[in-house]
């Protein structure tokens, strides 16, 4: 909804170059730490064990995509705007973790530096701006819409760095959200809280493709591992979003 009402030229370009749905879904409760864990560990909250949004949550009970990529020999990175996401960096699974600041521009700046050192593997970037402005000023408020545009500018910084390093043609980029929101809150089963965008572009992805089938936040980790050629656990609920890809074209 916000993307339709503000300027997002870099995200728009990914939609044109790749595949998308505006109707993917996240988990219940639709809150930051719980949703991100499902996004990056491929299963529902009762399976991964993170059911609250506080630091008192117990350790993640299943392998994360970082853990599986690392086992396969790939370097892994997390650059985030909220320190609590470090709970997903299980010991020995994330080579580089950074919380350089809160805003998307801080995350993007750090990502560009990291790309100079890591040019393969798995990198996760977290832009928290729309969540903060949504809670303070309201979902779909002018200031939240501005924050979405700011995130798009940060996305552009990262995409331009990929171009500069000659990595764009062999990088699968996935853009999604952990949750939506309404009024000044989120966390409920309200469709405004649970409906999220899911966009991917890169090797093997069909250009301008609208994904018709259901997509869950669980599927994000599985799709990233599929792109790396890493085996996906058979008991994961998340599956690669095969509809995004052209038949008989290699994503790897």
Image (cartoon, helix red, strand yellow):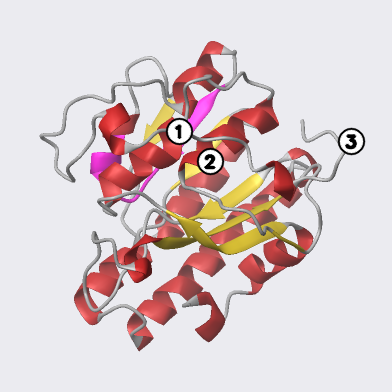
- Residue found at the very far left of the displayed protein: 56
Which class describes the residues within 10 Å of circle 3: few (<14), some (14-19), or many (20+)?
Answer: few
| 92 with respect to 203 (left or right) | left
Residue 137 x, y percent position in the rendering: 24, 81
Q: Does the rendering let one see residue 117? A: no
Asked if the stretch drawn in magenta spans residue 134, the answer is: no
Instruction: Name the residue nearer the viewer: 30 or 117.
Output: 30
Q: Which residue is mark 3?
A: 248
User: Which numbered disc, 3 or 1, marks the residue that appears first in the sequence?
Assistant: 1
Instruction: Indicate whether residue 79 is drawn in magenta.
Output: yes
Which image quarter: residue 113? top right
Residue 77 is situated, as x and y percent measured from the top left of the image, at 48, 32
Earlier in the chain: of badge 2 and badge 3, it is 2
Dot 1 falls on a residue whose secondary structure is: loop
Residue occupied by mark 2: 219
Figure quadrant of the C terminus: top right
* Residue 53: image location, x then y, percent: 18, 46
Contact (Cβ within 8 Å) of mark 2 with mark 1: yes
Q: Distance of mark 3 from mark 1, alpha carbons? A: 25 Å
Question: Residue at 69% of width from left, 47% of height from top?
Answer: 162
**Residue at position x 40%, y 52% in the image:** 26
**Disc 2/disc 3 C-alpha distance (Å):** 21 Å
Q: Is residue 155 left or right of residue 206?
A: left
Residue matched to label 1? 42
> Dividing the picture into quarters, in which one does residue 184 lie?
bottom left
Query: Which residues are the magenta region?
Result: 75-86
């Amino acid at each position: 909804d916000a993307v339709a009402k503000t300027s997002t030229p870099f995200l728009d370009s990914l939609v044109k170059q790749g595949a998308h749905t505006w109707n993917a879904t996240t988990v219940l409760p639709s809150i930051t730490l719980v949703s991100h864990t499902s996004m990056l560990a491929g299963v529902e909250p009762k399976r991964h064990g993170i059911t609250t949004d506080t630091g008192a949550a117990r350790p993640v009970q299943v392998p994360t995509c970082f853990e599986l990529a690392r086992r396969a020999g790939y370097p892994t990175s997390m650059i985030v705007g909220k320190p609590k996401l470090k709970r997903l960096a299980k010991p020995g699974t994330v080579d580089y973790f950074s919380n350089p600041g809160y805003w998307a521009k801080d995350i993007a700046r750090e990502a560009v530096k990291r790309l100079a050192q890591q040019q393969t593997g798995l990198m996760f970037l977290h832009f928290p701006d729309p969540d903060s402005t949504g809670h303070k000023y309201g979902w779909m408020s002018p200031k939240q819409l501005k924050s979405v545009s700011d995130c798009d500018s940060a996305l552009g910084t990262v995409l331009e760095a990929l171009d500069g390093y000659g990595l764009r043609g062999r990088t699968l980029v996935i853009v999604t959200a952990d949750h939506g929101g309404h009024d000044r809150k989120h966390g409920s089963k309200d469709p405004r809280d649970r409906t999220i965008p899911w966009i991917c572009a890169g090797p093997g992805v069909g250009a301008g493709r609208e994904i018709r089938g259901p997509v869950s936040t669980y599927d994000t980790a599985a799709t990233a591992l599929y792109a790396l050629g890493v085996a996906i656990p058979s008991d994961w609920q998340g599956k690669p979003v095969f509809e995004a890809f052209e038949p008989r074209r290699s994503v790897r």
